[in-house]
Image (cartoon, rainbow, N blue to C red):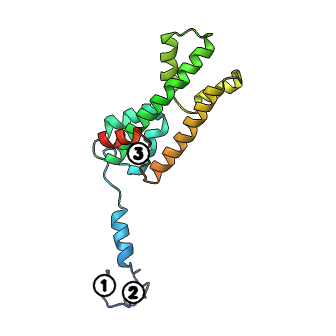
Amino acid sequence: MKCSECGAEVGADDNFCGECGAKLISEVEAKSEISSEKAETSLGLSENIEGLLCYSFTWITGIIFLLVEKKSKFVRFHAIQSIVTFFLLSIPVGLWEQLLDNDFYFYEEDFASFVLLNQHPLIPMYVLLEEPYTFGVLYLSFLSFFLWIFLMYGAYRGKKYKLPIVGGLAEKYS
């Protein structure tokens, strides 16, 4: 084995070059360094950070990253998964809240504003303080919250956690 800095012969068990003192990198470490280099993204951030940000404000940031990111399939996957997952989760929460607030009268304007404005997993939890009997909204809010944390953590770690049905769509269109 040779030192990558000075070219001197070194032993296989040596950690540093005896001639120049440079730290020796094994072939396994060299290959892992090459594979762990940042993949190129349109915004110049690392893929895992952009993937995490796709979920930060659920489907709204998913739309933003889907429109902005053109190079990274990893980021586009997380953007599409964020859009579909959290938009679909905001609909039943909005319906449930709408039916409880208006004594089972449905107003399209109120529902649309709820879905658009209260789409973040943390926001619907206020319902517990105002109306403790709304367990359906609370259940869906906690489901959204834990799913939101799980997906952000997975994206930050560089993983593609494919949710049933939604993950397949995201993979197909990313």
Q: Amino acid at mark 2?
A: Cys
Q: Earlier in the sequence, mark 3 or mark 1?
A: 1
Dot 1, crowdedness within 10 Å: few (<14), some or many (≥20)?
few
Judge from the rendering whether residue 80 lies leftward or rightward of residue 153; answer left or right.
left
Judge from the rendering whether residue 57 lies leftward or rightward of residue 96; answer left or right.
left
- Estimate the spatial distance between the alpha carbons at disc 3 and disc 1, rounded to whole Å: 39 Å
Tell whether label 1 touches label 2 (CB within 8 Å): yes
Look at mark 1 in the image and give the residue it sits on.
6
Q: Earlier in the sequence, mark 2 or mark 1?
A: 1
Mark 3 element type: helix
Q: Amino acid at mark 1?
A: Cys
Task: Classify residue 63 by image quadrant.
Answer: top left
Count numbered badges in the picture: 3
Task: Classify residue 68 by image quadrant.
Answer: top left
Residue 56 circle label: none
x and y, in percent, of residue 143 in the image:
57, 36
Mark 2 element type: loop
x and y, in percent, of residue 17 in the image:
39, 86
x and y, in percent, of residue 39 in the image:
33, 54
Res. 68 visible in picture: yes
Dot 2, crowdedness within 10 Å: few (<14), some or many (≥20)?
many
- Estimate the spatial distance between the alpha carbons at disc 2 and disc 3, rounded to whole Å: 39 Å
Look at mark 2 in the image and give the residue it sits on.
17
Look at mark 3 in the image and give the residue it sits on.
50
Q: Nearer the viewer, mark 3 or mark 1?
A: 3
Dot 3, crowdedness within 10 Å: few (<14), some or many (≥20)?
many
Q: Answer above or below: position of 35 versus 169.
A: below
Mark 1 element type: loop
Image quadrant occupied by the N terminus: bottom left
Instruction: Single out the residue that lies furthest toward the front.
Output: 165
Q: Answer above or below: position of 2 versus 129.
A: below
Q: Amino acid at mark 3?
A: Glu
